[in-house]
Image (cartoon, rainbow, N blue to C red):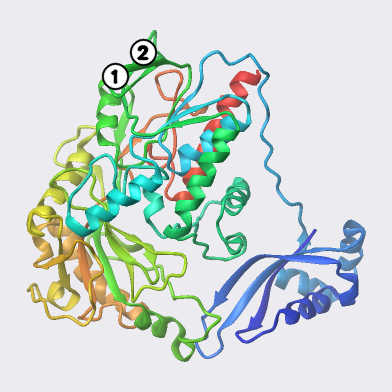
Amino acid sequence: MIRIEEILLGIDHEDSDLTDHISSILDIDKKDIPHFSVSKRAIDSRNKRNIKFAYSVDVQIQDENSFFENFQKKSKKTKAKIKQHRIRLFEPYVYKIPVVKEGIVKKRPIVVGTGPSGIFCGLVLAKAGLRPLIIERGKDVDSRIKDVDQFFSSGELNTESNVQFGEGGAGTFSDGKLNTLIKNPRTKYIFEQFILNGASEEIGWNAKPHIGTDKLIQVVKNMRKDINDSGGEILFNTCLTDIKVEDGKVVAAVLNDNKEIETDDLIIATGHSARDTYEMLYERGLDIKAKPFSIGVRIEHEAESINKARYHDFYKHPKLPVASYKLVAHNSEKRSVYTFCMCPGGYVVAAASEKEGLVVNGMSEYSQGGENSNSALLVNVNPNDFESDHPLAGIEFQRKWEKLAFIEGGKNYCAPAQRVGDFINTKSTSKNEVSPTYKPGVRFTSLDKCLPDYVIDSIKEALPVLGRKIKGFDDPDAILTGVETRSSSPVKLFRDDNLQSNINGIFPAGEGSGYAGGIVSSAVDGLKVAEIVIEKYNK
């Protein structure tokens, strides 16, 4: 194939315009282009008066190698095109899963967790013929939805079935954002699997792809069926409560305190909130370190105001999606304040997983049709901010602020909230133009009672700076809801070049183990671990 990038088309372009541009760039007749596909489409809104779409395409033509060789020799104008559009020969990546010989595996690999890392690791292990056992402490996604809805409506928390725990992991109740900064070719396979299992085909080319919570629910159910059909097995309501180690090697996993299953390969893909699992692994000698993470709040604006700030006069244009943003500011204390997990047209959700602790997160559906847009507004914290140098001190740091938020919200899982104007001026009122979306509800108060002083000061200093980057970001009527403490794992589980921990046979994987930062990177990490396990048997 021949890849062409940076094809800029006006906001009201027709589909045929893209073919015309490809023909012009390659200097060939349209009839000589048998097929092309869009590999990426992004919005170029740098000039708010002339918003464009930027395309990358893969073009199939006859005898591509010979054509490209001759194309490069044509003229100086052609060389300028090659540079401008980064025109090059392109070979599509194909992910291949090696198959393990039948009868080699005596003990099934065990995968702990059904988040993106665990589910993709389990999928590849199953397709390789290793018959993995995948365990999930929470419920299947249909049962989980009922528990989450009950929590949102009544404040009755199920500590084993919630926004953090259950089929699909924490990502199921999110925007299903697939943005990633990693340049790993395995991402193509991940996107293909999502599409195959029910996600929209546009995630394959959208520069800011998202699945949406409503579609993710069906996607994870379909992936479960694929794993089962391929020889794997998923057990819900099944928690890893202990491990058996002999001579520095894992020999068995203990499930729900009473069931022991022998294994040579234990993949720890628990997600960032499995605190009791971290504690058990630490007690059994697994090498764990505290790591930096971030805490802060969710900030909500009316979606239309963000659309206006990003698109100006085009804010109602039918071809433009609900606007998003990604912002960062650096304060005088050398801490970063940044937005994270932005949910256009979304909702702030209750993400607690422990009794008497309050956590918020963001979620949106495929349509992104909610009245408000929100994102996390976070400040980085480091191990030297914790109250001890214990490897699990970050967990206790999180718990401290979650408990204070629970108290400040009224001890009923309502969340503490504050208008931006009141937050900056250190006061509290309930008068606001933006309606909070958090359920079970919010209690207007002062957020300085449930966040560290340096986090409060950092956000106050950053808001006007971010308001200059996006008009209205620091609008006095925007709503801050706290606290967000689970943006990433507070620990990192050691692993060597073979992705094993200091206990032979244990493979830490994904975001919860400290090796990823989102759905796609977690899934990629799960694939890497699966490949190592498969390679071990194929040797």
Horizontal and vertical percent position of residue 401: 15, 50
Report the residue at 35% width, 14% height from top.
244
What x and y, as percent, mark residue 502? 40, 21
Amino acid marked by disc 1: Arg
> Do labels 2 and 1 touch, CB within 8 Å?
yes
Q: Quadrant of the C terminus?
A: top right
Secondary structure beneath dot 1 equals loop
Residue 442 shown left or right of residue 94 in the figure: left
Res. 486 visible in picture: no
Classify residue 490 as left or right of residue 522.
left
Q: Work out which residue is located at the far top of the displayed protein and give it.
A: 247
The kind of residue tagged 2 is Val
Q: Across the whole image, how many numbered discs are drawn on residues?
A: 2
Residue 474: image quadrant is: bottom left
According to the image, label 2 marks what residue? Answer: 245
Which of 398 and 458 lies nearest the eye of the viewer? 398
Q: Please tell me which residue is depicted at 7% across the width and 58% down the height of the picture.
A: 410
The x, y position of residue 529, in whole percent, is 52, 32
Q: Which residue is mark 1?
A: 284
The residue depicted at 29 percent of the width and 41 percent of the height is 273
Looking at the rendered structure, the secondary structure element under dot 2 is: strand
